[in-house]
Image (cartoon, rainbow, N blue to C red):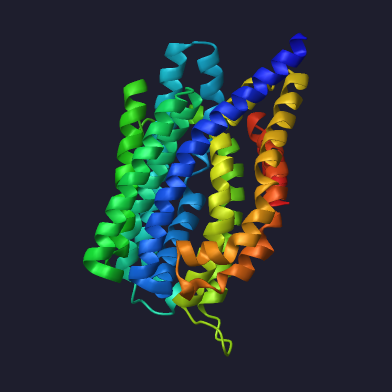
Amino acid sequence: MKPHHSNQASIGRILKYTGLFGGVQGFYALMAMVRNKITALLLKTGGMGQIDNFSRTTDLIASGTNMGLAFSAVPHIARLESERNTVAIRHYVKLVRSWVFLTALLGLSVTAFAAPLWSRLLWGDGSHTFDFVLLAPLVFFSTLCGGEAAVLKGLHRLKKLATVSALGAVTTLVATLSCYWSWGVEGIVPALVLSAAALCGMHWLAAHRSIRYEIAPMNWRFLRRGRRMIRLGLAYAVAGFVAAGGEYLVRLILLHCDAPGLHHGNDTVGIYAAAFTLTVTYARLIFMSMDADYFPRLSAATADTTLQNMTVNRQIDVLVQLTAPLLPLFCLLSPTVVRMLYSCDFSAAVSMIEAAAPYLLFKAICTPIAYLGLAHSSSRLYLLVESS
């Protein structure tokens, strides 16, 4: 009976933290839906497309410069936390934060100095160069935010992380809608930067209360101790850059597409962004809620192959049971959902949603397996799984 009870307890734990973060991410999704609805009414498809172009560009830069530290730092922090080694935890967290700070500066520099390139790549001219210069702090804040979130995950401060996520959802809603209402399309860049700054500040404060914020970005002898973390993180960064690059390439094609009878430019990107958000982005909320509990737990189980396999299989069971019943219902209701969450201007997104729905089921199966490479600090395995 003990294995049975242990199995039920383990699944109960998964559901508990998936429920905790699923509830928070669900609240975040609700705030995002309200934000998208009002944004769609205020800025139309063109404004939504411009927001997506800016967001995807900064995501691409961040994924290429953050060294994947938001992921590679978690396993070792989790192991040290399980050993209750306070001194080692403080030392390692200082190392993580130092590297994160340097990568944040790198992302800021790449965004600002290559601003003319990003503008010409998207719109064929330098009309948005200054916008990308102003967006450089967004990459800085998002990278710092990822580092502090990694600290909270590794320390298993899951309730604190959930609270910060919920507060961040409300703050983002207020900041973005205030900017759009006041300045229209001109408020897009301030809204993105203010939201990132507020979210970063809340994560920083929460992590600082757990472990005092200290960095040594100029001490090379100290930084060299993070080489293993960087090697593992680079695999995640490459995988993330490939994924972000693929999404970015699709948007470039849509932005410059000039087929008769179709929407053009930012309008096309806006419609595609709506479909992408309703399928891929909102589905990621389930996987993000899984990530906060599953990844540290899997990292702690790598020494026991049987326990490790049970952990992966249970996670797959939970994710498949959560996603499979929702897919047919989601496809059936997609026309109503698009009109309700956006507007009739976005009706072309329905066919995209229906075509993309099966992806979610395969993602539910593959994602827990993909984490094995990271949990074992095997960068090649993770890169192979994620790139395939």
Q: Is residue 220 visible?
A: no
The answer to which of 126 and 283 lies nearer the viewer is 283
- The percent position of residue 299, horizontal first and vertical second, equals 62, 25
The answer to which of 14 and 236 lies nearer the viewer is 14
- The percent position of residue 62, horizontal first and vertical second, equals 46, 51
Residue at image point 52% right, 80% down:
256
- The percent position of residue 294, horizontal first and vertical second, equals 60, 30
Residue at image point 61% right, 27% down:
14
User: Splitting the image into 4 quarters, where does residue 303 fall?
Assistant: top right
Q: Is residue 83 above or below residue 49?
A: above
User: Splitting the image into 4 quarters, where does residue 331 fall?
Assistant: bottom right
Task: Tell whether 354 sits left or right of 93.
Answer: right
The answer to which of 199 and 360 lies nearer the viewer is 360
Residue at image point 42% right, 31% down:
161
The answer to which of 159 and 292 lies nearer the viewer is 159
Q: Residue furthest bottom?
A: 260
Q: Is residue 6 above or below residue 154?
A: above
Q: Is residue 312 visible?
A: yes
Which quadrant, please, contains the N terminus? top right
Q: Is residue 26 above or below residue 159?
A: below
Q: Is residue 264 above or below residue 270?
A: below
- Marks counted in the figure total 0
Task: Tell whether 311 sits left or right of 233.
Answer: right
- The percent position of residue 116, horizontal first and vertical second, equals 37, 70
User: Splitting the image into 4 quarters, where does residue 33 fall?
Assistant: bottom left
